[in-house]
Amino acid sequence: MRKIRLLGDPVLRKKAKEIEKIDEAVKSLVKELFDIMYATDGIGLAAPQIGVSLRLFVMDDGTPRALINPVITFKSKETNVAEEGCLSVPEVFENVERSNEVSIKYFDINGDEIEERLTGYSARVAQHEYDHLDGILFIDLIPASRRFAIRQKLSNIIKQSGKIHSANKP
Ligand code: ZN
């Protein structure tokens, strides 16, 4: 099983590429993302988080979904603030402001185009995972004062990330 990439790993900061064809490789990547997400008690996981820079994430808010080439087509002006964490930034939990409601268009594993309106918790998870595809992490969205307060934690994760990265090299 591939390792979760941690803050400091350059793959988390890249803009991920669109998936051109939903082939067997993509299907097995989706399965792997679900396996790792459930094994780590996550509720969402994006492909870059396991080192694959493609526009794909999985989430399970009660309904397991794989979202291929997702596009957020609507974000409500109304926002709310709630605590988030991320498997790539372990043991850090911070309040993040997100839109209450989003519409998201994507292809599912069968290649069917789907557009969904998500609210509340589901909207939050989708926005967090979608950000990963553009190289954005939730700690980028917190006030600078909070980022300063957790700087030691973040720098420890970056150190750890370097170790995992080199351990993965052939
Ligand atoms: Zn995350």
Image (cartoon, rainbow, N blue to C red):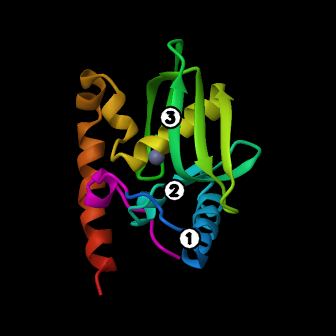
Residue in view at x 50 percent, y 44 percent: 129
Dots 2 and 1: beta carbons under 8 Å? yes
Q: Report the side of 99 relative to 143 (left or right).
A: right
Q: Are marks 1 and 3 in contact (CB under 8 Å)?
A: no
Residue type of the residue flagged with mark 3: Glu
- Give the alpha-carbon distance from disc 2 to disc 1, as whole Å: 9 Å
Residue at 40% across, 37% down: 138
Crowding near pointer 1: few (<14 within 10 Å), some, many (20+)? some
Q: Residue 30: x, y in percent? A: 60, 65
User: 10 Å neighbourhood of mark 3: few (<14), some, or many (≥20)?
Assistant: some
Q: Residues within 10 Å of mark 2 (few under 14, many from 20)?
A: many
Q: Which residue type does callout 2 highlight? A: Leu
Q: Is residue 149 left or right of residue 111?
A: left
The disc, 2 or 1, on the residue closer to the chain's N-terminal end is 1
Quick check: 14 left or right of 129? left
Residue 170 appears anywhere in the view: yes
Q: Residue 84 carries which label?
A: 3
* Residue where numbered disc 2 is placed: 56
**22 with respect to 54 (left or right):** right
Q: Mark 1 points at which residue?
A: 26
In this rendering, the answer to whether 87 lies above or below 140 is: below
Dot 1 amino acid type: Val
Element at label 1: helix
| Residue at far bottom of view | 170
Q: How far apart are marks 1 and 3 (CA)?
A: 28 Å
